[in-house]
Structures are given as structure tokens and as C-alpha cells.
Amino acid sequence: MSNAFESLAKIQADLNALGAASALMDWDQQTYMPAGGAEARAVQSSILSRMRHEIATSDAMERAIREAEEAAESEEELALVRIHRRSFDKATKLTPQFVEEKSRLTSEGHEVWVKARRGNDFGLFRPVLEKLVEMAREEAEQYGIDDHVYTTLLDLYEEGATKADCDRMFDAIRGPLVDLVAEIRDCGRQPDNGFLFGDWPIEPQRAFTERIAGAVGFDFDRGRQDTAPHPFCTGWSVGDIRLTTRFERYLGSAIFGTLHEAGHGMYEQGSPKNWDRTPLAGGVSLGIHESQSRTWENLVGRSRGFWTRFLPDLQQAFPSLASVGLDDFVRAVNRVEPSLIRVEADELTYNLHIMIRYELECDLLTGALAVADLPEAWNEKYRSYLGIVPESDSNGCLQDVHWSMGALGYFPTYSMGNLLSVQFWTTMTQEIGDPEAGFAEGRFEPVFEWLREKIYSVGSLKTPRDLVLSVTGRPMGAEDYLAHMSAKYRGLYGLA
Amino acid sequence: MSNAFESLAKIQADLNALGAASALMDWDQQTYMPAGGAEARAVQSSILSRMRHEIATSDAMERAIREAEEAAESEEELALVRIHRRSFDKATKLTPQFVEEKSRLTSEGHEVWVKARRGNDFGLFRPVLEKLVEMAREEAEQYGIDDHVYTTLLDLYEEGATKADCDRMFDAIRGPLVDLVAEIRDCGRQPDNGFLFGDWPIEPQRAFTERIAGAVGFDFDRGRQDTAPHPFCTGWSVGDIRLTTRFERYLGSAIFGTLHEAGHGMYEQGSPKNWDRTPLAGGVSLGIHESQSRTWENLVGRSRGFWTRFLPDLQQAFPSLASVGLDDFVRAVNRVEPSLIRVEADELTYNLHIMIRYELECDLLTGALAVADLPEAWNEKYRSYLGIVPESDSNGCLQDVHWSMGALGYFPTYSMGNLLSVQFWTTMTQEIGDPEAGFAEGRFEPVFEWLREKIYSVGSLKTPRDLVLSVTGRPMGAEDYLAHMSAKYRGLYGLA
């Protein structure tokens, strides 16, 4: 890198150190922190955020970016200044008063939401949500609306994605998915998955999940796995990426939770070492990230090949499964069933949960839907798309944490991830053939290596859109996804 | 607090947040961090230290302290400015070049020491140690030598303590301890402790040590215990204090290690909540801190009363101990035996290890001893005080990490802690009677409450010297300690 990048690198190192500290504090809070630590942690954490914000929006930072912009030549340098410019603009566009007010409202909003969900009291949350929606509109205006208020908000999580992309995506999958789910529901061939529920001991679950995460490519010399109520993946260098999982009555929670987070983790671990502690390292967007977690959770982890290799190990760890056959096991972990709770949804219905939230968010933001009418609209969409209706708002429009944190525009990235995972997979099988036969013998390197070369090692060098184009030769679409889902589930359920 | 304290409080909060982040990074590094995380952690951690140093030595800090000094009225305010002034002076007296050079040398020195110890090669470490001793002298000169070079260095760890204090302390205990240890060695009544060594499973050790730590008063809602190669206690608020322990072939490692760290932890947890995140909270010095860890490790944890209560529990957890009688158990955990390694030394010989290091440090610093002659001098002192001679420098003058980190002047605080633990204990028994009978019934609150009132709740409000004076009515002395040790071990060993 040229000398013009030196002051940028120095400021960037400071931001990275503060960010690493915040991330570690957050990891600790969700894994090991005793209850008594919350109060001081909140204060200390917010002070570090303030320090980081001050540095990220400083005159020195702006000057450093400008100088680097003038000097940038290589692809890496150009990417670096693009990322810094984007972050700087995002960080400086909101007024300090707005940032403070939003922080206050989301912190209060989260508490109210917890109470409202616990007490099934939408009325309690309603005035807060009204303010949060209003604030999201105001936020979009301060960032600047070139296209649509939704596009501006979405761009915070998925650079370059637009409302039109989302509309196209959901328009393409709405009909086929709703129909396929209904067909499965009505076919009368629901597989038994009761054997996956029980009081499973924790240690064999920990050992098994770490074994499969290691087998697919997660590097435990540069990472670890712990337990958290809501699994996540985090990290502060390519050499230290942390997964969390949870141990529940449904044995699949730990297994697929671990594979999901390991997918995020391998993406993070796969950045070039010489980009460590720079914005070039790490996943580029939420949608691309989700495509990687879904790949390992669903396309690998729910495959027949995978369980040909690992069902015997699982049966050894949990002897009550000894009599379960491979076919029955694979059908059980791929059981499709309309349900009320997004985070417990199967691979197929998951996108319908997302679509409902997306449609409601759009209507809330444009004013087409009043917050007061949200529960009814929510329930109506569940009836229409999934054929079931929540018996309470707690299991309905109060179930997700996102809105209470002011995060509108976030949900579609989950569906993008689902579509992209299959789009990448399809390209991969065209290039290296179907890797599933190898899974049965424990060979996951062909998949890992392809992803490492095409996606992991690119880090944040390319924009999400450019990455998809360069890897698959076309922008994100729904064709591969729909074809894959139709073939897979028609096969599993013996549909015509 | 008055308005003049507001800017001080703001800067202090920033320093606290950065300090908390550094402490968490350090805890994580010693407990959970994967090997791959070390490189980035070192960079990120040193950046946070630099930021903290910049704030701690800023003009704004100096101004805030000066204003607060002028406005200070209450005891708390006076203590606060005293502590800040002391920290500021310490932080600003060393030249930046010196700080950088010391950081470089100790980092390099540590690596060389690790190799030298592993290879039993004092010659490798010698040139580094020569530089480190020279640098310690230079450091004392930059801080300013009013009394003696040793006093200046000691004051970094134990405010207000002097070389004369150390000389008095060691002169008082040298003869009696050397004689008592020799008498025990020669008496031919060494108890068996072989039953404490074995391949103990970890989980029952974890459960048992957490039970006893909780029983004596460590609050697990405001703290936790993890595993680390070298046990320590750390924390970042009165609501989040962390212990570590280790599980070894000697069952006492975990038990007494946990009680030791829990003693540190209860001291930290016992600061008034409204002092949280200020320099008034937490233990005041290394010596006072060690007195609290030693109280729970030795005066409580090695007592007959304690094991009357807990031996049955321990036997339940480890059935191989079922046939061990109470008297034999108590004698075993109080076995005194001259040995070569400080960290494995018993309660009685421990101070002799410290005294040896103190005498050698003084001679190294004054030039009375050349570094080249250290191994010989070390061995001669072990022969003279403990009656044994290291067969290698690895088990001799290369065993401790302290000097490789440039920490000369630190060791005496261990002995101060030992003496003070008994001096506080003696005062306590005069005020509330001997609490040991209650231990047999699991009553530790009388001790906990007395310590809480007299020591924990005082935090860093008083200087170490004032605290000792106010609690015991006299400065630190050796009489109580010697009387206690003589009575205890003459009793255990049936000496006249």
C-alpha cells in the first residue's frame, strides 16, 4: 500500500481495536457474563461505541479517506477506500440528536417489547412501534432516499440491494412456495420426527457438533464454540472466530444451529490473513453471509450423503437412535410443516415467514398499514400463506426482536441468503460436479475449497452484487432455488 | 460530588471502559481464546493500552485533577483526587522512549526467559536480565528516589511501603521461620498426603470448588469461575468478578487455588456499589489483596473447622477419600516441607521463598550482586534457609516469571499479605471471638461480615497503611503471624 494509506491504516487499526473490544464484550455477555455484570457492561460498552463513532466521523478520518481516494490504484486499495467512504458517509449522515434519540428509544423499546411479548400485550408495544416506524422513516430521510424508503434502509444491511430486488424475489417465490407447502401439508405423508425430541445429555451434543463443524472445515485452532440462548457467530480476527450453539429438546437445534454458525464462521475464517484487522476481511453483507450459513446447514447438513457419514456417529453418541434408518432420519430432518415461529421454521416455510415481514414492513413504512392494524394484517398473511393463524400476538407479530431494535429492512437478507445459497451451489455443481457422493465418505473439501476460492477468499473486496455476478455469471434470481426446492421436496414427499 | 468533579468523572469513565475492555481481553486470552487469536489480540490490546495511556496523561486529565483537588472536601473526594494524582504522576514521569524500550525489552525478555527456563540455560537469560535490572534502576530514577531505589519500585505495587518495612518484616521472620521449618523437617512426623494425588475427574472438582467458594461468600450472581493454567482473579465491575482455578493431580491445587482467588474476589465484590467503575472501588494494594486471599485459603480453608464441614462432601465427590479421617486430612493439607518451587510451597515455607527473592533483588539493584553470580547466590540461600539446593536453574533462579517482565519490587507484597492476614485475623478474633467452631456448621458469615465491614467496604478509600492502622490499631508487624504459625504448626506436628 502506498504512503497515502498510512494515516488511514492507523485510524483503521484504532477502530478495529475498539470494535474488537465491543465484539468481545458482546460475545461474553451472551455466553459467560453473570447477571450482575449487565449494568456496568452496558455503560462501558456504550462508551467504547461512542469513542469508535468519534474516531470514525473525525476530521482526521475524512482527510485520511480523501487522501487515500486520490492515491488508490490497486483493486484492494480501491475496495478499501470504497468501504471506508461508505462507512464514513453512513456514520456522518445521521444527526447526533437522532442517533441519541434512536439509541434511547430502541433501548426502551426493547424492554417494552420483552414485557409485551411475555404478557401477550400488543397494546403495550404499539405506541413504541409507532415511534420506531416513524423513526425508521426519518432515518431513511437523513441517509437520503434516492429510490424508495425501503431501499435506503435495506442498503444498511445489504449494500446495493433495492426494494425492486426484494419485490422480484418474493414475487417469484410466493406462488410456488405457497403451493408446494400446501401440497406437502395435504399429501398425508408427514414423516415421523418424534425420535429427535428428548432430554439429550449436553456433553455428547457438544462433542458431536464440534466434530461435524470440524469435519466440514471450521478450524478450531482459529475459533471455538460455546453455548448461547440465541446462537450467533462473531469474531475479531481471522484467527479468532467464535460460534455459539444451544442444546434443546429437539436434537436438531444443536446440530443444524452449529452447522449454520459454522457456515458463517468458515466464511470469516477464510479471508486472506494479510487483510486481517482491515475492512477487507470478513463477510461482505448479511445476504451473502446467510448464503454461506444456509449452504452448510441445509445443502450439506440436511443431505442424505452427510447423514450416510454421520448417522452412525450420532447413533453411537445417542443410543436411543440406534434403530432409526437412514431414510427415515433424512426425511425427519427435512420435515416441512407450517408453523408460527420463524426461528423454528423448516427450510421451505422459512421464506414465507420472511415474506410476511417484508410485506408488512413495506406497508408500515409507506403508511399503507397502521401499526394498530398490524396484528390483524399479520394473522391474515399467516392464514393466507401458511394456512395457520397465531392464537396470540406473542406467537404472532410480537415474536421477533428486530423491530424493537429499530431494525426495519433487515429481514429480506435472510431470504436472499436462501436463494443465493442454491444459486452458488448450482454454479458449483456445474463446475465441479455433484459433491454429495463424497459426503458419505466424509469428503467436504471439494465444497469447502470451491467456496474458499470463490467467496471466502474474496472477503469484502467486491460488492455483494459484483460477487454474485462474478461467481455465478448473473444477478441473484429465484430459478435455481425454486428448481432445487421442488426437486428435493417432491422427491422426499413422493409428490408427482 | 461537586461540579468540579464532573469532567474528572467523564474522563475516568472513559479510562474505566478501556480498562475493562483490556481486562476482558486478558481474561479471555487466559481462559478461552484459541491459539490463532494471539496475534491480533496482542495488537488490539496494545492499541487499547495506548489509548488509555493517552487519556490518562492528557492535559485535560491534568486540568480535571487540578480542579478536583481544589474542590475536594469529603473523604471520598479527597481519596479520589489522591488516587488520580498518584496515577497521573506515575503515568507521566516515565519518558515515552523509556516506556517503549521497556515494553520492547520485557516482551523480548519474556520470550527469552521461556526458552531459557525450558532449556535450563541461565546464560541465555543473563544478558537480558542484566538489561532488565539496569532498566529497573533507570525506572526508579525517573520516578524519583526519595528513600531507596527499592522503595521507589515497591511503591508501584504497595503504596507507601518502604525498603525499611521489608527489612523489618524479613528480619523478624527469618530466624523463627528457618528454625521452625528445620524443626519440622527433622522431627520425623511428616504426615501422609499421598491420598491427595490422583487422576481426579474435572467436573466433581469444579462442582466442589464452586460450592465452597459460594459457601464462604463469593457471589456467583456477580461473578464466575473458569479454568486457567495460572489461576488469577480479575474483574471490571463490582457486579462481575471472575475467578480461575486449575485441576491438577494434587487435589489441593483446585481447592486452595479456588479459595485463594475467591478471597481476592470477595474483596473486589465487597466495594460499595456506588463506587463502581471509579478508582475507589476494588482492592487498594497487592499486599492487602494478598491478605484477603490468604485469609480464605489458609486461615479458613486449612482449618479443622472448615474440613469438619466439607470433608464429607469431598468424600462423596471423590469416593477414594472415604476412609481418610478428619485429623489425617487436616494434617495432610497442612504438610510443611522445604521445596524448590515457590508456587507449590506450603503456607510456612512460602515466605522463605519470598525472602530469598527480596534479598537477591536488593543486591542486584544496588550492584552488590552481579547477575552473572545470581545462580550461585540463589542456590546458597536455598541451602541456608530451606536446607535444599536446586539441581537446575530451571527449578532455581529461572522459575519465576516476574523478573522477565521487569517486575522487581513485587515479591515482598506476598509476604506482607501473609503477615497481614494473621494480623487482621487476630484483631477479628479479639473483637468477635474465634469463628472456627462455626465453620464446622458452615457458618462463615461472621468472618465475611467482619471483613466486609472493616476491609472490603473500604475499597481504595484509605491508603494500605491507614487501612491497617485503622483496622488493627498498629502498623504491619510480624508478632501475630509468628505466634499463629508457631502455635498452629507446633500443635500439628506435636512439637514441644
Image (spheres, coloured by chain):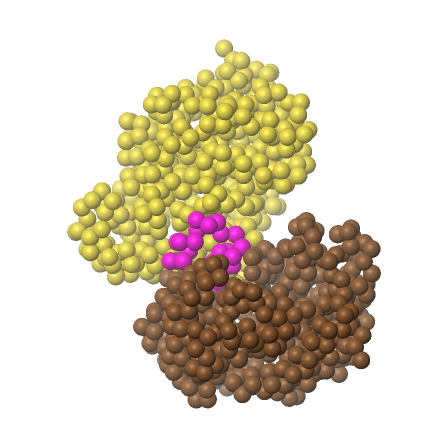
Chain colours: A brown, B yellow
Residue that appears at 66% across and 36% down? B200
Residues in magenta, as a range: A20-43
Q: State left or right for residue A421 relative to residue A429.
A: left
Image quadrant where residue A146 sits: bottom left
Residue A176 point in image, percent of width and height: 68, 82
Q: State left or right for residue B54 relative to residue B302.
A: left
Closer to the camera in the image, B374 or B40: B40
Closer to the camera in the image, B26 or B101: B26
Residue that appears at 53% across and 17% down? B492
Observer able to see residue B473: yes
Dominant SS of magenta comes to: helix
Image quadrant where residue A475 sits: bottom right
Residue that appears at 36% across and 66% down? A104
Residue that appears at 35% across and 49% down? B276
Residue A491 point in image, percent of width and height: 79, 75
On whether residue B91 falls in the magenta region, the answer is no
Q: State left or right for residue A324 relative to residue B455.
A: right
Closer to the camera in the image, B131 or A142: A142
On whether residue A41 falls in the magenta region, the answer is yes
How many numbered markers are drawn? Answer: 0
Image quadrant where residue A419 sits: bottom right
Residue B255 point in image, percent of width and height: 55, 34
Residue A177 point in image, percent of width and height: 67, 79
In this rendering, is residue A332 above or below A248?
below
In this rendering, is residue B174 above or below B5?
above
Q: State left or right for residue B333 relative to residue A103.
A: right
Observer able to see residue A9: no
Name the residue at the top extreme. B496
Closer to the camera in the image, B92 or A269: A269
